[in-house]
Amino acid sequence: MAPLSPYGTSEFDSRQFRTAMGQFCTGVTIITSLGADGAPVGFACQSFAALSLDPPLVIFCPMKQSRTWPVIEERGSFCVNMLANRQQEVSAKFGAPGDDKFAGVEWDPSPLGLPVIRYGLTWVECTVENVLDGGDHYIVVGRAQTLGEVLQDKPLLFYRGGYLSTEHPRVTPAQDSLSNLFTWAGGDEWL
Ligand SMILES: Cc1cc2nc3c(=O)[nH]c(=O)nc-3n(C[C@H](O)[C@H](O)[C@H](O)COP(=O)(O)O)c2cc1C
């Protein structure tokens, strides 16, 4: 295979930028919260990442036009649901505008009352710690408050604008030995 040219182009449009960013494979989450009227809200989100171990922080980036974001901002908390391979339909549902995204979706309330979507890989409930400007998105920093149970299943991945999964599920150690995972073999601390 020919090596990639190191020269590149500084003249690109948003379609080319999107294509380039689509080469980066991510998981898929549904970020949920609860309106003041008690109605569950949520949206599909791939811009989720672990940020800090101590304190335990995460980030996600909602578009400024997101209808879910003002609800999260008002409540001050959100729940990140990490999707399993079999939840493509859930991703499609929450990834498009809709008045009743939760119709036909099974969920249970978290300790703070936020929607935990069933059959995901795991979930983490967070409080909003900080909100930064990020162009046409916000960068939301959350502090992890509660961790859900870990399900042994394959992850749902998003790559080049489509869904895929890994061939085999990687077995996650039991919760009490998870701390082993937090040390990178090279010596530097990494998630
Ligand atoms: C796989 C996938 C990943 C997405 N990631 C993001 C994201 O990181 N940030 C974002 O704002 N929208 C993302 N979206 C788009 C939103 O889910 C979509 O615009 C949704 O309709 C927003 O809902 P809301 O307006 O009710 O918040 C993603 C959609 C899909 C299908």
Image (cartoon, rainbow, N blue to C red):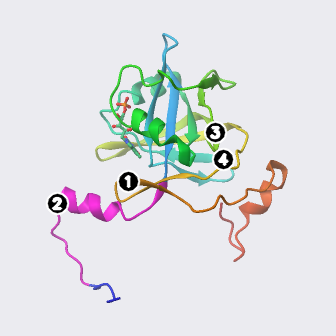
Q: Amino acid at mark 4?
A: Pro
The type of residue carrying mark 1 is Gly
Do the CB atoms of the residues marked 1 and 4 lie less than 8 Å apart? no
User: Which one is earlier in the sequence, the residue at label 3 or at label 1?
Assistant: 3
Disc 4 and disc 2: Cα gap in Å? 37 Å
Residue 124 place in picture, x, y as percent: 64, 39
Q: Which residues are magenta?
A: 7-26
Q: Which image quarter: residue 114?
A: top right
| Residue 56, disc | 4
Of mark 3 and mark 4, the one earlier in the sequence is 4
**Residue at position x 20%, y 75% from top?**
9
For marks 3 and 1, give the CA distance: 25 Å
Q: Indicate which quadrant contains ligand 1.
A: top left
How far apart are the two marked residues, 2 and 3, measured between alpha carbons?
A: 36 Å
Residue in the foreground of this view, choosing between 52 and 84 = 84
Image height of 186 relative to 56, above or below: below
Mark linked to residue 124: 3
